[in-house]
Image (cartoon, rainbow, N blue to C red):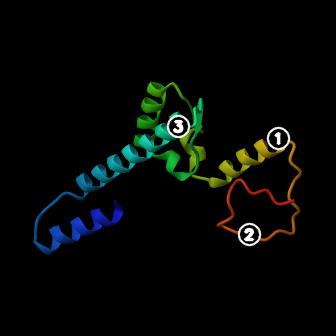
Amino acid sequence: LKTAVSRWVETQQRDDVEFRVEDVAASFQEAVADVLTAKAVDMCQEYDLKHFLIGGGVAANSRLRTLLAERMEAAGVELRRPRPGLCTDNGALIAALGVQVVKAGLPPSSMDISADSRLPIETVLV
C-alpha cells in the first residue's frame, strides 16, 4: 500500500497534477486502519478470541482506535487498549508482557542475555 501511494504521488507530480497532501494522507490512514482492523477481527473470529489487546505506537492513532472499537464491539470481542499517552512508549507494552510472564509463573531471564530485535515475543530465555 505504501509503495502504491508513493508511486501514485510520483505520477501526479511528474504529470503536474495538483493534489492535496492532506487528502492523500487521510486516504492512506483510512486504508491502513481498514485493513488492520479487518484482519484483527478476522483473527479473533478464526481463533474464537474474546479479548483483543492493542499496544505500541500504532495504538495511539485515533482513527485506528475508533474503527477497531467499532468493529470489535460488533464482533463481540472486548477491546483492551492503554490510553493514548501510554502507546507512544513501547516500554509500557513490554512491561505489560512482563507482568503476564510473572503471572504465568515463568522464571525471569538472566541479565546476561544480549538484545535481539528479531526475537519472537513468545520466546522466553531462562
Instruction: Give the residue pinned by disc 1.
Output: 104
**According to the image, label 2 marks what residue?**
115
Amino acid type for the residue under numbered disc 3: Glu
Q: Secondary structure at mark 2?
A: loop
Q: What residue is at 59 percent from the left and 33 percent from the top?
A: 49
Q: Residue at x 43, y 32 (%)?
A: 71
Mark 1 falls on what kind of element? loop
Quadrant of the image occupied by residue 6: bottom left
Is 101 positioned to the left or the right of 41 in the image? right
Mark identifier at residue 46: 3
Amino acid type shown at disc 2: Ala
Amino acid at pointer 1: Ala
Question: Going 48% across and 31% down the picture, which residue do you hit?
Answer: 72
Q: Report, in whole angstroms, how far the alpha carbon at label 1 lies from the one at label 2.
A: 23 Å
Comes first in the chain, label 3 or label 2:
3
> Could you classify mark 2 by the number of other residues whose Cα lies within 10 Å: few (under 14), some (14-19), or many (20 or more)?
few
